[in-house]
Amino acid sequence: MAQSTTKNNSAFFAVIALMVFMAIGPVLLMLVNSFKLDVDIISGTSGLLFLPTIQNYETALCDVLWYEPEHLDFCSVKFGGAFVNSLIIALVSTTLTLVIGSMAAYALVRFRFMGRDTVSMTTLMVRMVPPAVLLVPVFGLWNNEFCLDKEGFLGGMIREAFGGRGDVCLAGTHSGIILIYVAMNLPFVIWILQSFIVQVPRSLEEAARVDGAGPFGVFFRIVLPLIKPGLAAAAIFTFRIAWNEYLLASALSDRNTKTVPILIVNNMSEFNVEWGVIMATGMLLAIPPIIFTLFASRQIITGMTAGAVKG
Amino acid sequence: MTHSPDINDPEILKPPARKRSWQQKMNRLSPYMFMVPAVVIMAIALIYPLGYMIWGSFRDWNPSQSIGEAEFVGLKNYITLWGDPNFRESLGVTLRFAFIVVGVEMILGVGLALLLDRDIRGMSVLRTMFILPMMIAPVVVGLMWRYMYHPTVGTFNRTLESMGLPKVDWLGDHALLSVIIADIWQWTPFIFILSLAALQSLPRSALEAARIDGATAWQQIWFIKLPLMLPVLIVTCLLRLIDAFKVLEVILVLTQGGPGLSTEILALRISRTATEFRELGVAAAMSNYLLILLLIFTLGMFAFTRWQEIRASRVRAAAEDAS
């Protein structure tokens, strides 16, 4: 074994180098291009010989900059507003999903109750539902059924406070998008957290119970701190989906609740693509997931293996 | 899912009899209190919409009507779709895409895992880099690859040109291939990481026994490692297959389903039927076809894991009998 290892070593490291290059090459390419002017991108003065500029980022972020960039007459991209929307939607839906999902996972693992098997089976089944399948019903329901009558008490109050016409509907609000993201991510979070809760030693919970803690006290003070790694993994996956999702957000959001992926797709579909600006926006959208990957790759891998292997 | 029954015995949870009765009631109610938020949200935002969609698929329904106003047409939407060559084409593209992508990813991912299953320093750094593609937004992945595939300024055609080779019309003539390559780039790491984890948890004794018996590296892989990894591999494969039917954003950004219908997978067709053609009933029927397809794979996965569990417990029982 030993001599074959030394013989293969150079080939082995060549394979690794190639893999690393393939995995991060496109990302690096985007990073480099986001610092180039469109002229440089198109003329193809290839490679790394160019004058880096932050002009693309200035164009993308023009609505939140404290100064007016010189090269811009009109701020059209409005990345800042979309970024705030994305952030609100992703953070709120991740928090809600984790709290609600961990409670449900705890109940499914630790208690025997009527309807337990039905719930657990349904949870497993709806995991496979693609967002595209939810598009039609969610579009219909959020616009027509999940509404408050504008003549009614609550709806009237909201209309008076915020203005606008028509009934007060879930579509076009942050809550509407958050609701569907929470629902979409719950099955996955419940599934993944079950495998972590099973490992919590029963005796700890019983000790807390003897000391007089109620079921919720036991859960929040004893169980949750012990499944932190699982929570971290689940949080990253939930955040990733809520942060990256395009289809349902595009169906449910209006001008003021646009998220970043919608902004990117809208700017892409135009005939003349401004590569520099679009790459800068793409890079800004990719930064949070990249940071997670760099700092929490262990949790990501734990979560992935727990999700797949312990099915 | 393999906890022994005594752990879940409700008797353990029952408070001692001396405690007050309202607390007993509390304890009996607590599982429901833990479950209620999740059940309510999933019922409102998943189960009800799915039922609504099935109901709507029997109607001639456009976005300006509420579902009650839409005319009931029975199975018409399903029958029209089944006879529609465009739908069949789209179904074919979806199946081709999913199976090619998963097949290539399985071979590459497992192969790389077998190759890199050694103790090397910095493996965790490498793994971090490999999971990067999976974490990036599909929209951004589409963006990167659309740039690289660009007919004149794109990386690939420039490289080909500088080597004196003819240009390739990536997103035109070879659109499906290009989309497949982008997906393979993004998701091979998933299979790689899972198979590496499976490999490293294999029983060392079996591998050592094989080595002592003089098995070559190939024989070890073929007769020991792969068969032992098989259960994990099959579950991974099915998970990935289910996910491959959900892919939408990458293709939307890269080709928008074109040219023609060559990359229009079902998910994309559903969204176009609903938003561009404004035929919600037809889109709902199409969604149901997709759901039925996914249901088959999901049930297959359940059946497989259940069968594995039964077999494992039988083996355990046999081992206990023998000892």
Image (cartoon, coloured by chain):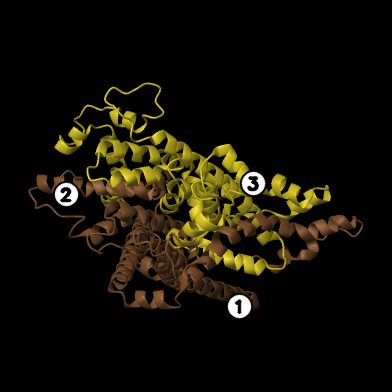
Chain colours: A yellow, B brown
Image: B142 above or below B288: above
Q: Are marks 3 and 1 on the same chain?
A: no
Given residues B155 and B73, the one toward you in this image is B73
Chain letter for mark 1: B
Q: Read off the chain for label 2.
A: B
Give me the C-alpha separation between circle 3 and circle 2. Answer: 55 Å
For disc 1, the marked residue is: B318
Does the image show residue A24?
Answer: no
Q: Quadrant of the C terminus of chain B?
A: bottom right
Say what amino acid the circle numbered 1 marks: Ala
Q: Name the disc covering residue A154, or none.
A: 3
Name which residue type carries label 2.
Answer: Pro
Residue beneath label 2, please?
A: B151
Q: Mark 3 belongs to which subunit?
A: A
Q: Residue at (87%, 58%) from the top-left corner?
A: B16
Label pair 1/2, CB-CB below 8 angstroms? no
